[in-house]
Image (cartoon, rainbow, N blue to C red):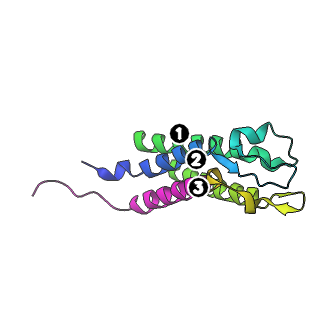
Amino acid sequence: MNYLRYVPIICVIGAIVGVISITQLWIHGVAGFEWSSDLTGIDLMGSDLDGFQKYLPIVICVISVLAAIMAVLTMTVRRLWYGIFICMILGIVVLVLTTVFSMWTIDGERIVHFVSSGFWLSYAAGGLILIGAAIQYSLMFIKPRKSGR
């Protein structure tokens, strides 16, 4: 059995974490601010906060779904060699977008001081997608042993 074929499952797990992150708290409200409320990734889209960053959780969710699709295609289609590179790029994009979210400033306060579990799950998702793709890429050059003597 060629177990190397199933390594992209790491990317799929990372993508699942990325999809779950949208349902978790991204901003944990602190009393004393006008916008002090607990907001999930879904709640951020409908909030009255200014800035394009409030749409980043849904963008990260969509990118995670694309990474899962590419990882599954890499497992099922033998000649899809570029799928792992696309997963690697998508993992980097998730990490960059999460970092851009952390640079958001509302009412003179940086949002990074108020982030919660959804934000950190997004970082974990990007890391898992990237690490899974990197492991798959490094294993592409290993030839499986032939069974028999």
Secondary structure type for disc 3: helix
Separation of marks 1 and 2 at Cα, in angstroms: 13 Å
Q: Is residue 80 visible?
A: no
| Closer to viewer: mark 1 or mark 2 | 2
Tag shown at residue 126: 3
Separation of marks 3 and 1 at Cα, in angstroms: 15 Å
Name the residue located 47 percent from the left edge and 47 percent from the top edge: 13
**Quadrant placement of the C terminus:** bottom left
Neighbours of disc 1 within 10 Å: few (<14), some (14-19), many (20+): some
Which kind of residue does numbered mark 1 sit on? Ile
Q: Is residue 59 magenta?
A: no
- Reading the chain from its start, which is encountered first: label 1 or label 2? 2
Secondary structure type for disc 1: helix
Secondary structure type for disc 2: helix
| Closer to viewer: mark 3 or mark 1 | 3
Would residue 41 be found to the left or right of residue 90 on screen?
Answer: right
In the image, 4 versus 92, the foreground residue is 92
Q: Is residue 13 above or below residue 96?
A: above
Task: Write down the region rendered in magenta.
Answer: 122-149
Name the residue located 58 percent from the left edge and 50 percent from the top edge: 86
Q: Which residue is mark 1?
A: 69
Q: Is residue 123 magenta?
A: yes
Which kind of residue does numbered mark 2 sit on? Gly
Would residue 147 be found to the left or right of residue 137 on screen?
Answer: left
